[in-house]
Image (tube, rainbow, N blue to C red):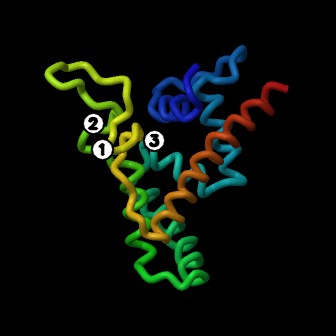
Amino acid sequence: MAKISERYSIARNTSNLKSEPRTVMSASDVIGAAGMAAQEHQDALLLWSVMYGGKTSQKMRLVDGLAYKLTDYMMRNRLKGNPRHIAMEVLAYYLHATCDDCDGVGHQIIPYTIVRSDDPCPYCQGTGKPPMPQDEAWQWLHDRVSELLSIAAGKTMQKIDLSID
């Protein structure tokens, strides 16, 4: 079964939002559940929207929101840096960063073949992304974005489950 994030991505890009009465995972169900989840978790669903085809205006709104939260964290912990710049870097990391050694797949090509190894890429440890900067503010915002992604998926699934009852 496809992950809810995959279903959301497909639903955002489909031209068929016909409601299917016997399903709870049609494109219209997923979009509707995400919309309901956004009522309580707007920042999490804005992130999801940006990750799966959002507009530039949504990206800039997300950067502003992430920078605002990061500014508060950096002030409380007396960290130096530009919160907006860090927010843009973290978002770009989530949207575009890929490991150069494995081309973002997480597994290297076996030498002299076109086959990928089952072992994780030693450079990225199988994540498909390059190592993150060791800056505290960067790490904090990265963790916050990971949390928001979990909230978006979890709350959308929760809304779908509630619609079953």
Q: Tags 3 and 1 in contact by the CB under 8 Å rule?
A: no
The image shows residue 128 at horizontal and vertical percentages of: 36, 40
Question: In the picture, residue 123 is in which quadrant?
Answer: top left
Residue highlighted by disc 2: 102
Q: Nearer the viewer, residue 113 or 32?
A: 113
Residue drawn at x 62%, y 40% as measured from the top left: 153
Q: Tags 2 and 1 in contact by the CB under 8 Å rule?
A: yes
Question: In the picture, residue 3 is in which quadrant?
Answer: top right
Secondary element type, mark 2: loop
Q: Tags 3 and 2 in contact by the CB under 8 Å rule?
A: no
- Residue 118 is labelled as none
Residue highlighted by disc 1: 99
* Mark count: 3
Q: Which of disc 1 and disc 3 is earlier in sequence?
A: 3
Relative to 158, is 44 on the left or the right? left
Q: Residues within 10 Å of mark 2 (few under 14, many from 20)?
A: many
Residue highlighted by disc 3: 52
Give the distance between the C-alpha atoms of the residues marked 2 and 1, in whole angstroms. 6 Å
Identity of the residue furthest to the right in this view: 165
Name which residue type carries label 1.
Cys
Residue drawn at x 69%, y 35% as measured from the top left: 157
Image: 80 above or below 66:
below
**Which corner quadrant holds the N terminus?**
top right
Identity of the residue furthest to the left in this view: 112
Secondary element type, mark 3: loop
Q: Residues within 10 Å of mark 3 (few under 14, many from 20)?
A: some
Q: Which of disc 2 and disc 3 is earlier in sequence?
A: 3
Name which residue type carries label 2.
Cys
Image: 2 above or below 71:
above
The image shows residue 144 at horizontal and vertical percentages of: 57, 59
Residue drawn at x 61%, y 29% as measured from the top left: 28
